[in-house]
Image (cartoon, grey):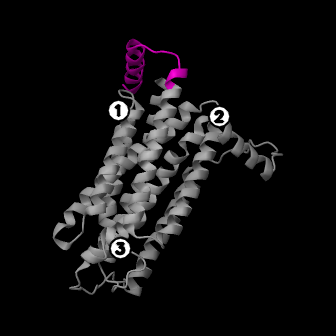
Amino acid sequence: MELTTSLSRTNGIFFGMFGLCNIVGNTLSSLVLYQGQYNSTNINSSSFCGANDCPQAETVDIISDPEPTVVYILLGVFLGCVATGLGVVGIFLQPIENQSTANTNTTKKSLWSWFRFILKTDIKFLLPFLSYTAIQQALVFAELTKSYVSCPFGIQNVGYVMTGYGVCSAASSFLFSKLAQYTRRYALLGLAAVLQMTLMLWLYHWVPSHHNIHLIYIIASVWGVSEGIWKTQTNSVLGEIFQDNKQSAFAVYEGFKSIALTCTFVYSTKLCVSVKLIIAMTFLVLGMTLYALVEVRHQRKSPKRTPEDDNEEAAKFETADS
């Protein structure tokens, strides 16, 4: 419990601060994009927005492009943010002393060690679960913004919708990292799974239109809440279950996360949004089922703990905070 609480709290602070980039970046983007002029259309978007958005559909593209001047302003704002960030890091971050030793591992040895860790540990059962964490990110950043925001409401609204997502993601990271010391991580992950399954089922049947734009803000916000849980608790799962091989476990996580993101963006240009939602829901069900198996195996191997032990550790952390 102590290790889980520490990991959850550390991840909550990091991902909470990391989520602030969504708030600032998306707010700036919409403020700039709203300065442009966009052609309105009377075309009924219900036949090709939302889950009906398909690459091969022979329909008129109603997503208006921003004016070149607006694009240049937006790029200039983002470039200024990058320069500011680099300046802050260069001025205030203390340099890290070089403590590395000569690394004689070749690429072949590293790859073999990577695959051997997968074959010999329970992390192989977590691969669908880890892959889903990337698939759901790609789904919200690619499909939600294009098919459910840009298509029916215009690209100038993407930033504001994603700002709501960023606020809820950052707040969720802080909040659930605190709640992790009072509840089990599988309960939090189960909550995130239920929230996102409900959202994907809703997106599968919902047809976005101009009179219900408020619904897309609610969907993005709830998705942000579940995203905060995924970020903090997934790292907690790997850090505790594979505490003797953290480096290898996180290497596998990042590796399969990159593979899943690549595959998702590749088939994104070939499949309808409805099919992409089905793929995501399949990975969610399979991933959570196998995660539950790994969690049960880990709990059986771990030494038994009493409620008094958990209460003592919770009191210890409350004392440390005060």
The residue stretch that appears in magenta: 299-322
In this image, 98 relative to 40: left or right?
right
Tell me the SS state at disc 1. Answer: helix
Q: In the rendered image, which residue does mark 1 sit on?
A: 179
- Label 2 near label 1: C-beta < 8 Å? no
Residue carrying label 3: 53
Decide: few, some or many residues near mark 1? Use Cα within 10 Å; few <14, some 14-19, many ≥20: some
x and y, in percent, of residue 103 in the image: 80, 45
Helix, strand or loop: magenta stretch: helix
Any part of residue 18 in sight = no
Residue 120 visible from this viewpoint? yes
Give the distance between the C-alpha atoms of the residues marked 1 and 3, in whole angstroms.
Answer: 39 Å
Which element carries disc 2, helix, strand or loop?
Answer: loop
Q: Amino acid at mark 2?
A: Asn
Q: Residue 65: x, y in percent?
A: 37, 83
Mark 1: amino acid: Leu
* Residue at the spot of label 2: 245
* Left or right for 201, reference 297: left
The residue located at (40%, 70%) in the rendering is 272
Is residue 312 magenta-colored?
yes
